[in-house]
Image (cartoon, grey):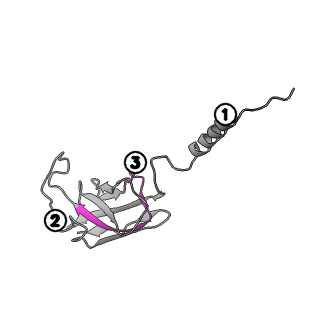
Amino acid sequence: MIQRISRATVCIMLAGCLTTFTACSTKPSYQEVEIYPTSGSVTVKGEPAYGAVVILHPQGDVGMTKGNRVFAKVKEDGTFAMTTYITEDGAPAGEYLATVIWPLDPNARGPSPDRLRGKYATASQSDLTVMVEEGENQIPPWEL
């Protein structure tokens, strides 16, 4: 005996297949664009700028619309790795201006005076540029 498959059954099966295919996507659902490992280092007068915060400001469309900020916190050795979605995952490809703020207290939970006196605090003041390309990116060391 031949059984007929109802439209509802076909729709449910199709929805299940689509869910399976989208679940196997190469990037997590919260990730809008591909990101690439991006790292560098910051020193001031030859010393690591431990606790400094680096923020990348896109100079054009990099595909992010959910308000994510590409940022990093400088480690004790002066190195940093950019974060977009999860810790140290990287940055989307594109051209950026970088800002750097170095709090007097690197462990402060609130405002702390900027050791760099605002020289690199805004994109309009900073002359630090970054180009992120597909693949691994090493930003040349910044001596501020």
Q: Nearer the viewer, mark 1 or mark 2?
A: 1
The residue wearing badge 3 is 86
The residue wearing badge 1 is 8
Q: Front-most of 117 and 16?
A: 16
Tell me which amino acid carries mark 1: Ala
Dot 3 lies on which element?
Answer: loop
Q: Nearer the viewer, mark 3 or mark 1?
A: 1
Name the image quarter holding residue 45: bottom left
The residue furthest right is 1
Dot 2 lies on which element?
Answer: loop
Name the image quarter holding residue 3: top right
The residue furthest bottom is 127
Magenta residues, start to end:
83-100
Expressed as whole percent of the image width and height from the top left, the position of residue 125 reads 21, 71
Please report whichever mark, 3 or 1, sits nearer to the chain's N-terminal start: 1
* Mark 3 to mark 1 CA distance (whole Å): 40 Å
Tell me which amino acid carries mark 2: Gly
